[in-house]
Image (cartoon, rainbow, N blue to C red):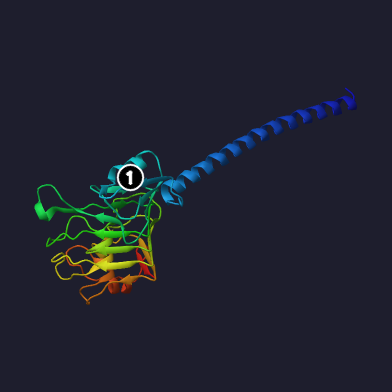
Amino acid sequence: MTIEQRLAEVIQSCESLTATVEQTIDKINARVLLAETEFQNFQTQANRKYLGTLSKPDKVVTAHDQEDVYDKLVEAYRSGHQFVQLEIPENTTCYLNKVVSIPAGCGLMIQGADIQSSVFEAKRKTNYQDGDRGVMINTFYIRAGSSIVCNSVQLKQKPLGGFAAPYGHGIFLIDENSDEPGSTAIKLRECKADIYDCLVYFQGNRLGMVNIQAQKCDFNLVDNQQWFQSSKSAGLIGLRSWSDQGAIMSFVGNDNSFDKSSDTEKVCHFIEAFNSGKDLTSTLLATPASEDRMILVV
């Protein structure tokens, strides 16, 4: 075999190897492109499920006067909607007859047309056969990664009378049994709230951070005799105790008003919502932060 023939064989072998390598590269590129697409889809779904990053409602339900909106809200989430808007027109008061749990990664916007006449009311419900001792406050349960936004609406807790502290508190409840990761947000803008124990009841959040924001809101104390053992105060945020507070929480407020008649009859930032109604604001802010527990008030 001549040198020319050997060179021709080597060249042919190289060309065959090059073709094989190019085919392999094309297959790798196709797999990489597919992996990128799948990962991008996963990121989108993860954001929706765990981070609550939705900013525009994908379902609007309209409340009617004196309507229980439970069925409308539950059906919206069961149908796969991620961010539901509850529209409350002028001269309309709506309420819940059962607790609505906001699914992980989903959101709810309560949008009022007029702060004076667009009203969401939290009502009492007697639990089982316990009589007045078994009072439940029908509210929203918020899981990790979920969000609540309230705009131009009046939030009311209906006075219950002379009862001991109930099994449920607040209008918005941060669920302690939520194991999903992700940040939880409650944002109030130009709202009015009439409260006798707390607006947000913080059971605890095992993972992530809870951020509560209020801007240009008016928080008013509603008299509810003998509700707490030692105080008639109400709180924007109610806690069971410091040990139950959970992970990291921040409150950012701007241009808000807090009703105050005296040191024991007022709306404060934090209260002990179980039995005493004690103002915990100064105590919490004076407690050193740890790696897994911090409260920040701005």
Residue 120 in which image quadrant: bottom left
Q: Residue 248 at what x, y percent from top left?
A: 36, 62
Q: Nearer the viewer, residue 178 or 290?
A: 178
Q: Nearer the viewer, residue 160 or 101?
A: 160
Helix or strand or loop: what does disc 1 sit on?
A: helix
Q: Residue 227 at what x, y percent from top left?
A: 15, 64
- Left or right: 54 in relation to 240: right
Q: Is residue 241 above or below residue 14?
A: below
Q: Nearer the viewer, residue 198 or 285?
A: 198
Q: Is residue 58 above or below residue 23?
A: below
The three-letter amino acid code for the residue at tag 1 is Leu
Residue 10 in which image quadrant: top right
Residue in view at x 67 percent, y 35 percent: 25
- Left or right: 1 in relation to 26: right
Neighbor class of circle 1 (other Cα within 10 Å; few <14, some 14-19, many 20+) is many
- Left or right: 278 in relation to 103: left
Residue in view at x 37 percent, y 38 percent: 79
For mark 1, what is the residue?
73
Q: Is residue 108 above or below residue 192?
A: above
- Left or right: 74 in relation to 58: left
Query: Dividing the image into 4 quarters, which one contains the C terminus?
Result: bottom left
| Count of numbered circles on the image | 1
Q: Residue furthest bottom?
A: 262
Q: Residue furthest front?
A: 91
Q: Residue 229 at what x, y percent from top left?
A: 14, 68
Q: Nearer the viewer, residue 273 or 268?
A: 268
Q: Residue 75 at what x, y percent from top left?
A: 33, 40
Q: Is residue 292 above or below residue 288?
A: above
Residue 252 in which image quadrant: bottom left
